[in-house]
Amino acid sequence: MVKTKYQRAILKLSGEALAGQNGFGIDPATVRSITQELKEVHQLGIEIAIVVGGGNIWRGSIGAEMGMDRAQADYMGMLATVMNALSLQDALENLDVPSRVQTSIEMRAVAEPYIRRKAIRHLQKGRVVIFAGGTGNPYFTTDTTAALRAAEIEADVILMAKNNVDGVYSADPKTDQTATKFENLTHLDVISKGLKVMDSTASSLSMDNNIPLVVFNLNVPGNIKRVVMGENIGTTVGNKKN
Ligand code: UDP
């Protein structure tokens, strides 16, 4: 078997990653190409769990800005992540990659409820586990879910897949020419410099539980594999600079 850097990884996919060119909703061709890459990574023998966002369909903060109750709008966001999870499962199944969706809010007709030990068992049996529904609580994000689940299942790393950005920069590289890319950062740097990697709750949880992240560009084919093989293609964030 090939030697990989990580044995058990959480891949954080934003909802936007599934939207393709449309920028909204689910683009089945885009979902297929992501799952094709996941299949290659799965074939390396790595245990993979996915935390998927919902921003391609709905964000609680937008509902709240339009006058909705924040918690109600957030529950809608959590439901959006379930749709994304089902689309990922469908595509994985078409590629004969075994998978299970677990939701933090019970909906037994469509998926299993989240049970930590069962999730770990699925991973050990070579199934890709897709965590849907976020943390199950309003006022949180799926970045925080990724940090929480990573701690719970003792993942070695969170792979933070970004759209068209190849790491963490000192400023927005699209608008600021002086922006420089960091190769390594600490969670504390991210929090104190206010860098846009994850929200602060997710960063603190990652710091307190010593969970490393790799921020990388999902839009370059083969990048998920490069990251798990340990190639330095993005920004690594941990408790120590390495
Ligand atoms: N959400 C929530 N609690 C969670 C995770 C998500 O309330 O634990 C809601 C929140 O409204 C958020 C939406 O679900 O805006 C979609 O999740 P997120 O914004 O993290 O998705 P992404 O930006 O990764 O697509």
Image: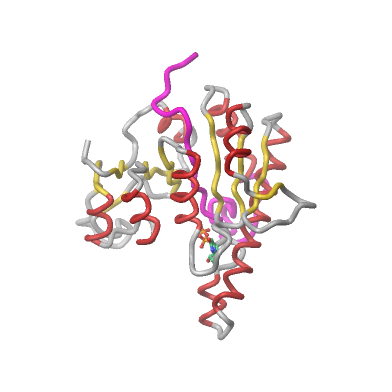
Residue 2 is covered by the magenta coloring: yes
The x and y percentages for residue 89 are 68, 42
Screen quadrant of the C terminus: top left
* Residue at image location 23% in from the left, 56% down from the top: 170
Provide residue 76's location: percent of width, then percent of height.
63, 68
Q: Is residue 34 left or right of residue 184?
A: right
**Viewer-side residue, 155 vs 55:** 155
202 or 154, which lies in front?
154
Question: Which of the 4 image quarters holds residue 229?
Answer: top left
Q: Residue furthest bottom?
A: 67
80 or 103: which is nearer to us? 103
Of all residues shown, which one is farthest toward the front?
A: 117
Question: Can you give x and y, in whole percent of width and height, for residue 101 in the image?
Answer: 67, 45
Quick check: 148 left or right of 113? Answer: left
Q: How many marks?
A: 0
Q: Residue at x 44, y 35 (%)?
A: 223
Q: Which colour assignment does the render follow?
A: secondary structure
* 232 w.r.t. 88: above or below: above
Q: Residue at x 50, y 40 (%)?
A: 153
| Residue nearest the viewer, comparing 124 with 97 | 124
Task: Tell whether position 7 is magenta.
Answer: yes
Quadrant of res 48? top right
Q: Residue at x 56, y 57 (%)?
A: 134
Q: Which residues are magenta?
A: 1-30
In the rendered view, tell whether residue 197 sits above or below residue 2. Answer: below
**Vertical position of residue 96 compared to residue 18: above or below:** above
Residue 18 location (% of width, % of height): 59, 51
Going by the picture, which residue comes out furthest to the top?
A: 1
